[in-house]
Amino acid sequence: MQRLIVVFLGLFAIASYPIYDIVIPTYFPALHYNLKRNPLNEEAVQLGRLLFYDPMLSADSSTSCASCHSSYNSFAHTDHKLSHGIKDQVGTRNAPALFNLGWQTIFMWDGAHRNLDMQALAPINHPRELGFSLAGVLGILQGNLNYRGRFYRAFGDSNATGEHMLKALAQFQLTLISAGSKYDRFRQGNASFTEQEAKGYGLFQRHCNACHKEPLFSNYQLASNGLLPDTVLNDPGRMGITGREEDRYLFKTPSLRNLSYTFPYMHDGRFSKLAAVLNHYSTGISPEARPSLPLKGPLNLSGSEKAELISFLLTLNDSAFVFNKTHAYPMELRQIWK
Amino acid sequence: MKQLLALLLLFPATNHAQQRFSFQPRWNQTVLKAGSYYPAAHTTDSFRIDVLRFYISVLQPNNSNEDPEHVLIDLSEPGSQEYTSHNNGKHLLLGVDSLTQMSGAGGGALDPIHGMYWTWQSGYIHLKLEGTVRSADGRFKPFSYHIGGFETPYNTLQTLNNDSSSLNPDLAVFFAHTDPWTQGDVMSPGLKAVTIAQAWKACFVSKR
């Protein structure tokens, strides 16, 4: 009996530190994120998930990452033009959807961050987002025995260090892979497009694929899409980071996956409908906004072409991703603060 | 014999030479103390330093696959000013090397908890220098230099030639190149930061 218990405990010890395996479709490019520096394990992913949903990461314990990045909206802040943080403060940009982050080379609309781990420092510290500090967050985590146990199980060290907190958050976010849309099934040979969708796919490849490169539907580079700045926000884009005139109006190209869940669109959420977005690309591009090369001429899409393009874009919706329970609010969070 | 063998297996022979470095901030020949005013030779102003923290990267030889070592030196922690490197690296950088900057969250000296990482954009702060300048007629002005940036065209990384194990920066040299009255606050990457980084490098070049 004793031996049986030992064997059982031994199994438990191994089972409590399992490698977390992410499934990457064969037609996706190589992952940009270096997993060797932060190997995924189930405990760290779950710790990252708890942190992602924990409002204790904000200065007044009111707001979490998930407040503006909700799982059931493909981790966007749906129906909010601009996102708001603590004390009802409204920011200056539309919170982007979060998925396939392991392939992104730059983060934030202006590419301010170059690495997924460190990106989390921005919302934690921003006065209009979580309005807190790394030291403040770590102090709170360090004072909670449940979290300390989680840190130990994830990283073999019960101290809530900045490195481990950021790596855990990155691990959870790396598991947010959207690859279950009709388009994906088409790529795998398990679905076929309708005639309208197929025509839309052709239009997409001709007019959109240069920047919104499939299968991720973004090249994750900076570009101007010919949108003049909102006169109130007057957002200079990338130039706000570099101070260089040539970077004015450059924003990161977002992915076109999950568009039905992530409205409104553009960095300032100015368009609530896909039709309005297509109207912009068709006839609304402003030369003063210095559009990047692929957009130098107007697309002049006909009404039926717009309908075809939209029907293709809707094949990029991934409901399996949006309703994936392993990404949703973790009930264990209630136990953590008991 | 078996025990000896086990020991040998546990501690594989290493031919890595250890190198000791001293990074003790000075004002001319004097050991720099936080909070004291120091007179300068080139002006009637005097300078007080309250915060001085900086990174040094010890790069591995070219044929090595190992990561660079990173040292965070703090004026208020004398223990941080002595460093023993465990590699044969001959090349030192003032700041955190670009590869590490792109590599994600680091631990130890690189943990962002030290306040040496920008939050609003990517990048370690290579040098944090804060204090006050005082004129002969009793006027004061605080200054704040948070110097970093590793992307072109405003790369602020500076190479040091490690031909001496004593690399004690002389802050008097810094203020011979930098006037806090006209350029008192530089806290983001850009051309100004590049100029300040050059003044910072000069502190290591003169009067070792």
Image (tube, coloured by chain):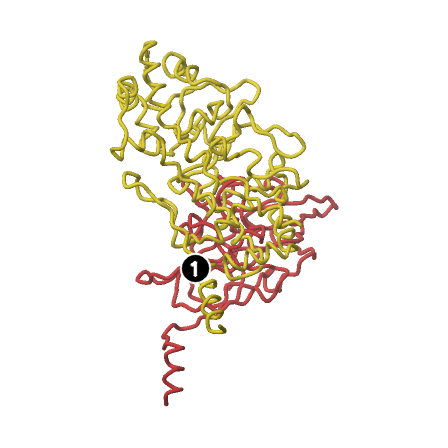
Q: Colour of chain B?
A: red
Q: Residue furthest top?
A: A303
Q: Is A332 left or right of B195, judged from the image as shown?
A: right
Above or below for A142 versus A283: below
Above or below for B184 versus B86: above
Q: Image point 40% across, 82% down: which residue?
A: B7
Q: How many dots with numbers?
A: 1
Q: In the figure, residue B91 lies in which quadrant?
A: bottom left
Question: Which residue is label 1 attached to?
Answer: B92
Q: In the figure, residue B182 lies in which quadrant?
A: top right
Q: Residues within 10 Å of mark 1 (few under 14, many from 20)?
A: many
Residue B26 in the image: x percent, y percent?
Answer: 59, 61
Q: Secondary structure at mark 1?
A: strand
Q: Image point 58% across, 50% down: which residue?
A: B115
Q: What kind of residue is marked 1?
A: Leu
Residue B114 in the image: x percent, y percent?
Answer: 58, 54
Above or below for B13 versus A198: below
Q: In the figure, residue A157 lies in which quadrant?
A: bottom right
Q: Image point 55% across, 46% down: which residue?
A: A50
Residue A237 in the image: x percent, y percent?
Answer: 48, 28
Q: Residue furthest front?
A: A1
Identify which residue, B184 or A7, lies in the foreground: A7
The chain coloured yellow is A
Above or below for A218 versus B88: above
Instruction: Return the chain for callout 1.
Output: B
Residue B37 in the image: x percent, y percent?
Answer: 69, 55
Identify which residue, A244 or B111, lies in the foreground: B111
Quadrant in the picture for the N terminus of chain B: bottom left
